[in-house]
Image: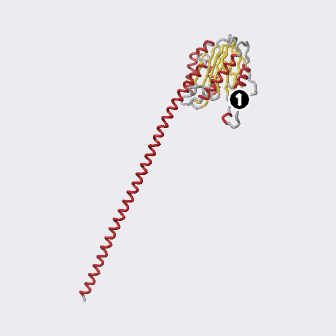
């Protein structure tokens, strides 16, 4: 009886041991399978990531090559454009008198002429007529290439108009500006109601001054410009008509002619609005006409060469750290 019970107990123990070993084996087999599956999935994911990285790298290399090509094309375009603009500057300079031409008529004179973008929307000219000497300073719409194109057109128009007064004893400067305005409006494109780019006026602001041959008197008309005359330490600012020579809401109104008697040693200053509109100084504000009037008053007692150097110094120091806002022109003449 005891032997039978022990046999049964041993059989049960053996069964339990076999069952235990089976479960241990099963666990190890399953763990190996799970491990194998995890490594396979990991290898698959790594493979996919490598493929994506390679694809991104190829795309990056392609875009980088396109960018390099675009940069090279831009550099070539920039160089060709700069060459063209430099050549345009030479053409423009050929129709604008140099300082020697001005000094033939006005020995005591200087010119400060500083385009913003190589070619300029400003121009000046001097004409020796039979009975009069004429000085013109003008500021055409725009600057850079557009201003340069308009400058060539306007200076040709001015010279042509002045040639018609070659033998005139008296020149009505207001009439000259009126005829120039009619010519420019008729010559330049008609306003297109569907073209928003034509909302501004194509034309020019201008100072037109006619000297008698003895340089004892001037008649002048001003369109959106001021004229400064320095006599015995006093600066008189003459204001112009507040409209341009060109298309404008007031284009049917007349310009006005003004006159001023001169004495030997007086200084006359002609300028565009480029200096007075220049941002600069410690408070980053415009130079303004009040400061310009003081500047020319300080210049007047100096000799002509020193006036030029002081003008360059003053304007350069004022705009230090700021971009040049517009073309700048200032002419000083001592009679």
Instruction: Please provide percent x and percent y for residue 281.
Output: 57, 29
Nearer to me, 145 or 276: 145
Q: Quadrant of the N terminus?
A: bottom left
View extreme (left): residue: 3
Secondary structure under the numbered disc 1 in the rendered image? loop
How far across and down, in percent of the image, does residue 231 sit?
66, 16
> Above or below — where is 166 with respect to 321?
above
Classify 56 as above or below 129: below
What is the quadrant of residue 252 in the picture? top right
In the displayed orientation, state which residue is furthest to the top: 214
Against 60, residue 263 (above or below) is: above
Q: Nearer the viewer, residue 44 or 245?
A: 44
Q: How many marks?
A: 1
Which residue is pictured at 55% across the width and 27% down the height?
Answer: 84
Q: Can you give x and y, in whole percent of width and height, for residue 27 in the image?
A: 34, 69
Image coords of residue 34 (percent x, y): 36, 64
Say left or right for 207 vs 9: right
- In the displayed orientation, state which residue is furthest to the bottom: 1
Residue 250, relative to residue 112: is it above or below? Answer: below
> How crowded is the residue under tag 1: few (<14 C-alpha within 10 Å), some, or many (20+)?
many
Residue drawn at 74 percent across, 20 percent down: 175
Foreground pick, 167 / 101: 167
Q: Is residue 203 visible?
A: yes
- Residue 274: in sight, yes or no? no
Mark 1 = which residue? Answer: 247
Q: Quadrant of residue 25?
A: bottom left
Quarter of the image for residue 148 reads top right
> Which image quarter holds the C terminus?
top right
């Amino acid at each position: 009886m005891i032997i039978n019970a022990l046999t049964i107990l041993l059989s049960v123990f053996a069964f339990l041991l076999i069952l235990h070993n089976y479960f241990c084996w099963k666990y190890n087999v399953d763990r190996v399978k799970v491990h194998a599956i995890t490594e396979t999935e990991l290898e698959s994911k790594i493979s996919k990531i490598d493929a994506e990285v390679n694809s991104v790298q190829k795309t990056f290399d392609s875009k980088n090559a396109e960018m390099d090509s675009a940069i090279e094309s831009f550099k070539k375009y920039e160089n060709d454009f700069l060459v063209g603009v430099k050549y345009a500057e030479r053409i423009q300079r050929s129709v604008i008198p140099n300082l020697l031409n001005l000094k033939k008529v006005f020995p005591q004179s200087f010119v400060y002429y500083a385009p913003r973008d190589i070619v300029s929307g400003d121009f000046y000219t001097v004409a020796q007529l039979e009975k009069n000497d004429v000085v013109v300073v003008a500021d055409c719409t725009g600057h850079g290439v557009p201003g340069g194109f308009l400058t060539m057109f306007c200076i040709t128009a001015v010279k042509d108009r002045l040639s018609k007064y070659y033998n005139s004893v008296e020149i009505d400067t207001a009439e000259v500006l009126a005829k120039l305005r009619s010519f420019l409006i008729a010559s330049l494109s008609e306003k297109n109601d569907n073209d928003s780019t034509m909302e501004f006026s194509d034309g020019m602001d201008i100072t037109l001054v006619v000297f008698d041959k003895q340089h004892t008197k001037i008649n002048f008309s001003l369109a959106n410009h001021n004229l400064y005359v320095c006599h015995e330490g006093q600066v008189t600012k003459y204001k112009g008509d507040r409209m341009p020579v060109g298309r404008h809401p007031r284009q049917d109104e007349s310009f006005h002619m003004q006159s001023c008697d001169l004495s030997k040693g007086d200084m006359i200053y002609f300028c565009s609005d480029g200096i007075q509109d220049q941002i600069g100084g410690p408070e980053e504000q415009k130079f303004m006409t009040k400061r310009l009037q003081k500047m020319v008053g300080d210049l007047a007692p100096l000799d002509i060469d020193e006036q030029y150097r002081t003008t360059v110094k003053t304007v350069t120091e004022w705009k230090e750290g700021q971009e040049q806002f517009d073309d700048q022109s200032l002419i000083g003449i001592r009679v």
